[in-house]
Image: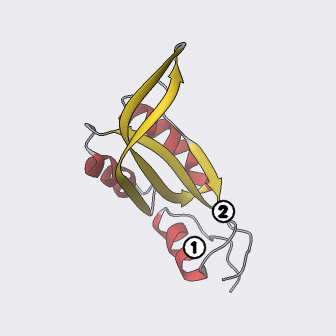
């Protein structure tokens, strides 16, 4: 694997345990906003909210997509997510397997993952 320019990104969000994680993931994939959504095991999150320290049981969600889909994902999160301010972090992918990067781009309907052929 070589580092190479790519438009594939990893979008991170968290969801509460009581949210239907499978339905959440399936929605993003079926709407072609994500090639793959990985939902992690339950975890504890501690954070500041409205001047107080809060804690919640959540799941980390990793969305594999392209930069072109981030705005649409942000809009969809506003519809699907129960939080007033859902986590939305976009991490650029600096490289990876060319076949995987091409697969991600193809699944979300973008032309090229930026991999060299």
Q: Is residue 56 left or right of residue 89?
A: left
Of residues 11 and 114, which is closer to you in this image? 11
Of residues 108 and 24, which is closer to you in this image? 24
Which of the image's four quarters has the N terminus? Answer: bottom right
Q: Earlier in the sequence, mark 2 or mark 1?
A: 2
Which of the image's four quarters has the C terminus? Answer: bottom right
The furthest residue to the bottom: 117
Q: State which quadrant residue 110 falls in.
A: bottom right
| Residue 40, position as x, y percentages in the image | 38, 54
Residue named by callout 1: 101
Q: Secondary structure at mark 2?
A: loop
Q: Residue at x 27, y 52 (%)?
A: 22
Disc 2 to disc 1, C-alpha distance: 9 Å
Residue named by callout 2: 7
Q: Where 18 sits versus 24, above or below?
A: above
Q: Residues within 10 Å of mark 1 (few under 14, many from 20)?
A: many
| Residue 52, position as x, y percentages in the image | 50, 15
The furthest residue to the top: 51
């Amino acid at each position: 694997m070589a580092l190479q320019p790519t438009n594939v990104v990893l979008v991170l969000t968290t969801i509460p345990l009581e949210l239907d994680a499978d339905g959440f993931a399936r929605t993003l994939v079926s709407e072609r906003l994500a090639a793959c959504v990985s939902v992690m095991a339950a975890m504890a999150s501690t954070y500041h909210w409205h001047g107080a320290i809060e804690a919640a049981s959540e799941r980390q969600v990793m969305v594999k997509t392209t930069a072109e889909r981030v705005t649409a994902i942000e809009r969809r999160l506003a519809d699907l997510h129960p939080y007033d301010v859902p986590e939305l972090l976009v991490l650029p992918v600096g490289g990876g397997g060319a076949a995987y990067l091409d697969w991600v781009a193809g699944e979300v309907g973008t032309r090229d993952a930026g991999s060299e052929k």
